[in-house]
């Protein structure tokens, strides 16, 4: 039953689109991707999450997760069409693919696959962030019940939740930048191919 809810393979496949030993990327990119949000999440020490920030983050995440699900369907359609083209290897005018066209098609297929993995991760990250916001809310709201006898524990918990939520939000923004860049590359490859 747990295997139906396990998303670790989505996270792993997303990480492999950034860095894969001996195949792609630089390990520094992976450190930057997961490390840079840590620096920004320390902002929580100065400005812990408030109701307004929590509402903003949850609204943005909810909207983007819905949009990303739609984009994911479109990416599946593009991948299917690219697979059909690679099967037949014939252009619209009836000519057979050149080696350069085969290489371009292979790159487009890899790009759509990576884009699908990045979008899947972004959707999972939105769900994780919304869950963190819910837990933060459950921690903050009953403050009047226990903050009077353990104010330090309450303050530390609030800051911890803030650090986690800021980290997840910055990680989501970086993932969205990856998605935008790869989408742009895919569209530009299609436009160049059309001309």
Image (tube, rainbow, N blue to C red):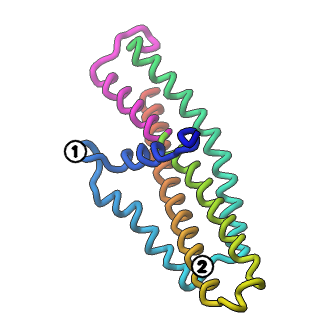
What residue do we see at 67% from left, 59% from top? 60
Q: Nearer the viewer, residue 146 or 179?
A: 146
Please identify the quadrant where the N terminus is shown: top right
Packing grade of label 2 (10 A; few <14, some 14-19, many >=20) is some
Q: Where residue 84 sits in the image (x, y, percent)? A: 47, 17
Q: Is mark 2 on a helix, strand or loop?
A: helix
Relative to 130, 21 lies left or right: left
Q: Nearer the viewer, residue 68 or 11?
A: 11
Q: Which of 95 and 165 is in front in this view?
A: 165
Q: Which of marks 1 and 2 is in front?
A: 2
Q: What element carries label 1?
A: loop
Reading the chain from its start, which is encountered first: label 1 or label 2? 1
Q: Which residue is labeled 1 in the image?
A: 22
Question: Which residues fall within the magenta stretch?
Answer: 90-116
Question: Is residue 144 depicted above or below 172 in this figure?
Answer: below
**Magenta-drawn stretch, dominant element (helix, strand or loop):** helix
């Amino acid at each position: 039953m747990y295997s139906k809810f396990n998303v670790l393979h989505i996270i792993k496949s997303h990480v492999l689109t950034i860095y894969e030993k001996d195949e792609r990327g630089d390990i520094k990119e992976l450190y930057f991707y997961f490390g840079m949000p840590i620096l920004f999440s320390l902002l929580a020490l100065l400005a812990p999450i408030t109701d307004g920030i929590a509402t903003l983050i949850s609204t943005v995440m909810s909207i983007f997760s819905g949009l990303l699900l739609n984009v994911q369907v479109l990416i599946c359609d593009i991948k299917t069409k690219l697979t059909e083209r690679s099967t037949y290897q014939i252009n619209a005018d009836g000519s057979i693919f050149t080696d350069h066209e085969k290489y371009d098609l292979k790159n487009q297929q890899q790009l759509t696959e990576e884009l699908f993995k990045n979008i899947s991760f972004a959707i999972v990250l939105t769900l994780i962030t919304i869950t963190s916001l819910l837990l933060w809310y459950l921690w903050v709201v009953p403050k009047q019940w226990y903050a009077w006898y353990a104010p330090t524990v309450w303050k530390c918990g609030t800051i911890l939740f803030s650090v986690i939520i800021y980290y997840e939000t910055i990680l989501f923004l970086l993932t969205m930048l990856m998605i935008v860049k790869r989408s742009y590359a895919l569209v530009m490859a299609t436009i160049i191919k059309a001309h």
